[in-house]
Image (cartoon, rainbow, N blue to C red):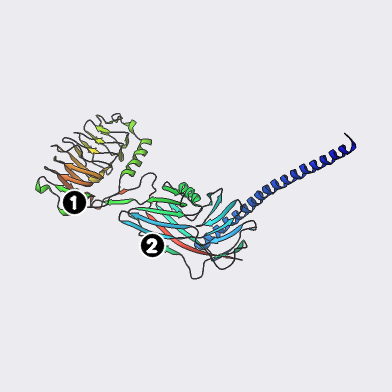
Amino acid sequence: MNDGERGQSEVIGVVLLLAITITAVTVTVATGSVALGLVTDEAQSASVENGMSQLSSQSSLVALGETDARRFDLGSVDGGKLRLDESAGRVEVRIETASGTTTAYNGSIGTLSYVGSQRTVAIQGGGVWSLEGGRGRMISPPEYHYRGETLTFPIVRLTQNASSTAGGTGVIRQPPNVSETVVETDNPLRNGTVVVEIQSTYYEGWYDFFADRSDGTVTKDDANQTTTARLVVPEEVSFDRTLAVADADGYSHKGTPHNELSESEYVEGGSYPDPGPLIRDQIAAAAASNDNGAESCVTATGFDGCGTVGSGVYYFDGDTTVTDDFSFDTSGGDVVVAVDGDLDIGDNDIAVQSGNDNGVTYFINGSLDLQGDPTVSVDDASRNVFYVDDGFLDGSAGDGNPTIEGIVYAPNADVVTKGNPTLRGAFVTKSLSTGGNAKVTYDESLRGEQIRITGGSGQDAITYLHVSENVVEIDFD
């Protein structure tokens, strides 16, 4: 290699070294810039998140009348975009019943959002939310309080005057001549389902909030960015008549004429809540904790030669039979019988001993059957209560003479009996057709008596609903 070639090699080497160095520096600077940008955005978002949480707390105080106005400072908002959209976010509260739907509230609530390059932080409905990676989550909870059977929902609606949102400081106040608007509802609620529906960019955060705060049914609709919570109103069923049937023209009697009920003794075409959820809830509770082991005659399939059964909770995980006459001694407390199937009393007598006010309650996730001439007796019908999810007297279509005294709540049962049953107490069925010498008589001790049908597990009960709209105005400097 001559001197010229050696000189060219040295120049090429220097050029290559410079190129590699420049490329490395460029990549490092670019990577560092991205990383720095992410760190900067995260720091600004965290600062705004803290400011938003404070502003949310202050807006709730103003909205609920604790103070007239408060100043706020969201921190540095230079790295993103601050925007208040009065139409963003919608709340609907409605009450659904068999007779129709009543809307208690339906309106936009407004959203103040800080949009960074990676994450959005927002105030909505009195809560603080974030959106990152396309999913919303809750930072601090909204003004929504469910305690016992009371839902208090002071809806905080955000508005803005004509000022710009360029800065992150300002004043939050109640608008002039605007005060809390209370939504009137007929408390206590008597029946139906209270539905709270939220349409929001942060619907997943609302979903997590509802799911965490209650056992009610909570669903989300990704396509419409909507979260819905449902709370069931417990229904009070009164027993001021002998018979109530859900079907119109649901009662008929083709037997002995003087045993037919008069028009004042029965009602047709009523609406009666399904006992299924309550029955299944009670069965689950009895399966988890029961007193089966305290009575040797309580077997896996029923009551077998008991004689007397004391107070307690007795659980059966399938069809259940009674093999001999026996009585319940309730002197030590109430009795619960939970049957996850049919209860077949057969031709056996069951009595509830007198001398106290305690009673026996049956939860039957199937049918209640009697055959032959059994007697299920009690001194006061209110002390013997049957919740039945399916049929009643399914096996008494022959010439038997079964007698049952108590309250039988079986609104899903189409009852057809051609025998000679005696029913004393109060009875709710889907329909009842009697024949022969059948007798259906009322127990006057039930006058004013009520039973309460709740939604069961997974359906929060609600009796009192308090909804209000509380408007606050944000005035930026």
SS at mark 1 in the image = loop
**Residue at x 43% of width, y 48% of height:** 219
Is residue 253 visible from the viewing direction of this image? yes
Occupied quadrant, residue 69: bottom right
Q: Amino acid at mark 1?
A: Asp
Q: Is residue 58 left or right of residue 4?
A: left
Question: In terms of sequence position, does the residue under pointer 1 or pointer 2 come before the other?
Answer: 2
Nearer to me, 131 or 281: 131
**Residue at x 59% of width, y 51% of height:** 119
SS at mark 2 in the image = loop
Label 1, residues with CA under 10 Å away: few <14, some 14-19, many ≥20: few
Q: Amino acid at mark 2?
A: Glu
Q: Residue furthest bottom?
A: 177
**Which mark is drawn over residue 184?**
2
For label 1, the residue is 249
Is residue 289 visible from the viewing direction of this image? no
**Which mark is drawn over residue 50?**
none
Q: Is residue 336 left or right of residue 153?
A: left
Q: Is residue 401 left or right of residue 140?
A: left
Quadrant where the image shows the N terminus:
top right
Q: Residue furthest right?
A: 3
